[in-house]
Structure formats: C-alpha cells, structure tokens
Amino acid sequence: MIKKVISIALLFMSTMVFVSGCGAVTDKSTSGDYVVKVNGVDVYKSEFMIYLNEAKINFESIGGVDIWETDFEGTTAEEVAKNSAIKAIELVKVSNQKADELGITLDDSEKETANKEAEIEYKSLGDYASKNDITLEDVEKVMQDKMLYTKVYQNVTSDFEISDADFNAYYDSVKDELMDYYTEYMLRSIYVTGYTKALEVVEKYNNGTSFDQLFDEYEEQEGIANEPEMSYKGDLENYFGLEFDVQVGNISSILEGDDGYYIIKVEDVKSASEDEVIENAREVYTSNKKEQLFNDEYTKWSEYIKVEKNEEVFNSIQVR
C-alpha cells in the first residue's frame, strides 16, 4: 500500500498536537527546566518534547530520515524543527488564552474524549516518553489544549460562508488541473526496501512471472493484501515526484518512495467525475478560506505575544 503524503506546510506549523489532562497534575514548576514561556505560561521540557516529536514525524514524512542533513538557508533542519515546535506551542497557547475571553471551555465529555486519545498517543510514544520524562498527564494536558484550540478555531470560522461567484471563478481557473488530478487509478503494488530487489521484480515480470507470484515472493510490508486499491493521479505524482501515465495492464518503472521502492501495476483508469471534483474543490476552497480567516484573527491576537525562550535548555535539546 502506498503511503499518504503529508503537506509540506506541516514542516512549519503543526497544529495536530497531543493534548489534555484530568486528575492530579505533576508539579514541574520547581524543576527550572522550562523551555519557553508564552505570555507568562511555562512550557516545560516534557511538554515541549511532545510538540517536537510531532515536528520530527512531519519532517521525516516529507523528506525521509535524510532530511536532518538538509540546510534551510543557513539553518539546520533540527533548528527549523525546534522552532516549528515553538510556533505550534504559541498557536495553541494563545488560542487557549483567547478561549477564556470567548467563554469557550471543554465540558466533561470532551475532556474524557481527549484523555482517551491521550492514552493511545502515550502508548505510541513508547521509549520516547520514558527517555524524555513524558508522563500520561503531560500528554493529556497537550491533548486538551489541542481540543480547546480546535473549538476556538471553529468558533472564529463558524459563520463563514463562501461566495458562489468567487468559488465559481476559482473553479473555472483550476478545473482542468483538478480533473486531471482526480483521475482514478486502480492499482496493485509491490514494495521492497532495496533497489536490487526492485530490479529483480521488474526483470522477472518482463520474463513472464505473474504479478501475483512476485507479490507473494517480494512484498515486504506486513499485513498488506494483494488487492487493487484506488489512488488519485495527483496523489501518485505528488508522492513520487514525477508524471504518472502508466497504461492499463502495464507495470511502472521502479518508483522511489521516501523509504523504499515500488513497482505498480495499473488495473484500471477512470476519468474523474466532475460532480466529485466540484465537491472536493469546494471543500478545499472553503477550508483554505476559513484558515485564512482564522490566521487573520490570530495575527491580531498575537500582536502582543511575549515569548521567552530558555536558551540554555532549548539549545541542549536534540531532535534525534
């Protein structure tokens, strides 16, 4: 199964952060290891490391593990990731402070939902949690903050309605690209981690070995069934970074993903339904406009943000 692509915007502003907390909260105020203060609110290292882990995951989803060797205009990838975590913290903390002004709170049911999500996230952290002194209470706190941020976002954008005239003008300008993007490919794939094995797959297929037999022999992802799955042309092109134009019944050349190699067999190709394309375009257009509206409001709120970074602690933190 081909992995989904994460938007590059997540490199710089990840709002999908763990949040929440009920029950007794460990007092870390005497430890002196705060990383950053946002309008006087301390964020200690254990909480910061949760945000940083999200940034790390997002970076590696986009650029693979080699991204940490990348230089961003004179700044290391690690430094960019750490600053991205701080930006995410600012967004959440300032929005949470705004929630007080707007009278927005979490009810008991929402807190319970956040806590259940926190349990799942905490387990997924595994050794990372123990290594960085992250407790379940830390994750609960972050999950609740995230949920409260979401409620503020919804409050700010709830009355927004798109202009049909504006949307129609937008759609007309991108219709051809979207119809091409949403072309549906039914495909099967074989994934291997080594290029030599990928060459073997292609060679054996060209010499008459069936795709089914090659799947059974070479597929390296556990639990993946040899069944057709649908992918949009645009998603395939975004993931592999090249034009995808494989004909029905044929296999692709060796395609490099972020962590291995794919050989894809196309079973069927179906032109996009314009009704579906319009629906998808309207969703994206509305989401983008709401995000723009919220960002405009957030810019006003953040005009007087006071952010204090504990340089000694911040500089000692490593992403990997």
Image (spheres, rainbow, N blue to C red):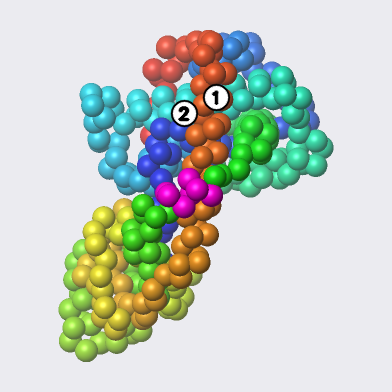
Q: Amino acid at mark 2?
A: Ala
Q: Where's the N terminus, which quadrant?
A: bottom left
Q: Is residue 235 above or below residue 107?
A: below
Q: Residue at x 59, y 37 (%)?
A: 18
Q: Measure how far apart labels 2 and 1 are at the Cα level.
A: 17 Å
Q: Residue at x 72, y 19 (%)?
A: 101
Residue 265 in view (yes/no): yes
Prevalent SS, magenta region: helix
**In which quadrant of the rendered view does residue 229 lie?**
bottom left
Q: Residues within 10 Å of mark 2 (few under 14, many from 20)?
A: many
Residue 85, numbered label = 2
Relative horizontal placement of residue 154, taking residue 250 as reference (left or right): right
Relative horizontal placement of residue 282, taking residue 317 as reference (left or right): right
Q: Which residue is mark 1?
A: 298
Q: Is residue 315 magenta?
A: no
Q: Where's the C terminus, which quadrant?
A: top left
- Residue 36 x/y as whole percent: 51, 16
Q: Is residue 208 above or below residue 238?
A: below
State which tag comes first along the sequence, 2 or 1. 2
The front one of 21 and 126 is: 21
Q: Amino acid at mark 1?
A: Tyr
Q: Residue at x 38, y 59 (%)?
A: 175
Relative horizontal placement of residue 261, taking residue 47 as reference (left or right): left
- Residue 96 x/y as whole percent: 65, 25
- Residue 301 x/y as whole percent: 57, 18
The magenta-colored residue range is 164-170
Residue 215 in view (yes/no): no
Q: Are marks 2 and 1 in contact (CB under 8 Å)?
A: no
Q: Is residue 167 magenta?
A: yes
